[in-house]
Amino acid sequence: MKKILIALIVFALAPSTSFAGPKIEVLHWWTSGGEAAALKVLKDDFAANGGEWLDMPVTGGGGDAANVTLKARIVAGDPPSASQIKGPTIQEYDQEGVVAPYNIDAIAQAEGWDSLLDPMIAAVHKCQNNSGPYCAAPVNIHRIDWMWANKEVFDNNNLSMPTTWDELNAAADTLKAAGIIPFAHGGQPWQDATVFEAVAMGVGGNNYYKNCFVKLQGYTDPGSPGRDWNVATGMVIEGKAGFQIMGDWAKGEFTAAGKSPGWDYMCVPTPSNNGYLYNVDSFIFYKTDDPDKVAGQKLLAKLMMGKNFQKVFNLYKGSIPARLDVPMDEFDDCAKASNADIKTAGASGGLVPSFAHGMAQGNTIKSALQDVITEHFNSDMSSVDAANALADTVLANM
Ligand code: GAL
């Protein structure tokens, strides 16, 4: 009896290493109305499969603040079990030795991710220089080079969506003359960089700053510095501003506000020669000894690449599925156009990774370039000085 009692006490006091169920701590920056609605699809799926989700949101569109928090946790030896991540940064963290490829590669193999993803997108999510095991999972493809406009405002001013940068400037002048803020913008470094890369891709050449980038700045309102992107989208939704250049997470805000494309708002890509700036949202999984978290990582990776999840999530998020086999018939015309254009761009060499959203470079050079662009957008820095500063920044980071 005494022995049994002692055994029971020892058992009760022993630290629990037993499996309690899948658990995951997710660090992300999806806090706007549209973003949160999309993420809820994943949280609900995770809970419905018996998982416990510990949410770690870091507000700030574009993820600059979230990336600083993530880096700090990694440096402190306390990474979350999963986090939002972009393209090349996956390899940076892998090289730091904090990523846990084998937890999810088995899922990726069992579910056949190689056959569900475009090979270029698949490679981005494989550790060991893009050719080892899968260590991250993609949930979507966002397009950056979009313009969003309020239909009523455009109709009332006899305007149609511009198809050239000159038409865009002319439309902005008409709106300005009518007393409407032409261009809803938030003056934050990543938003300035988002507009910059759309203009740079579409125009190129020596005069692009002067003709488009600088001119666009003159079409914003005095309240733009520091404004959050979804507040700027709200200005278009309410008809306080004519249009916005922003990735298609902006459509998530229109959707959350109950607006329909074609009726309430219009979407067209910014003018370019079949260019398509792409931005894939992914989640990466970090090393952990906790069996609940390992189970959580496996469950989350499996759910994220699920066929129905990728449909429902992307209907809310504004993006298109990363999986190639998701039917597009329930998507709206903006998403259908994105899905068609990505194929055209891919076939004609126009598929360009977004630097403003961390798809082309890691976070260090991205931030350095953003600093120059945002200074140019928000000061009287000349175009020549800005071009030289950009070149110097690239050289310094090579
Ligand atoms: C992007 C991200 C999108 C959206 C946006 C604004 O970098 O890929 O999913 O969240 O930031 O926050």
Image: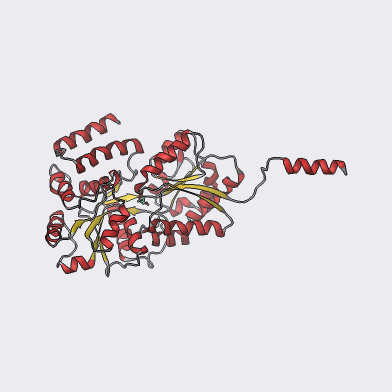
Residue 69 in sight from this viewpoint: yes
Outermost residue to the front: 223
Q: How is the image coloured?
A: secondary structure
Nearer to us in this view, 345 or 377: 377
Position of residue 395 relative to residue 20, above or below, is above
Which image quadrant: the N terminus? top right
Which residue is located at x 49 percent, y 48 percent? 26
* Extreme-right residue of the structure: 1
| Of 107 and 212, the residue lying toward us | 212
Query: Which x, y percent locates residue 119?
Result: 40, 48
Count of residue discs: 0
Q: Is residue 128 visible from the viewing direction of this image? A: no
**What's the residue at 19%, 62% (across, down)?**
161
Residue shown at 34%/60% (left/top)? 253
Judge by depth and name the residue closer to the eye, 310 or 129.
310
Q: Is residue 104 left or right of residue 313?
A: right
Image quadrant occupied by the C terminus: top left
Whether residue 113 sits left or right of residue 189 in the image: it is right
Q: Quadrant of residue 238?
A: bottom left
Say above or below: 106 vs 71. below
- Comparing 234 with 363, the one in front is 234
Residue 312: give x, y in percent of width and height.
Answer: 43, 62
- Residue 124: x percent and y percent? 40, 44
Residue 217, given in percent of the width and then of the height, sits at 18, 48
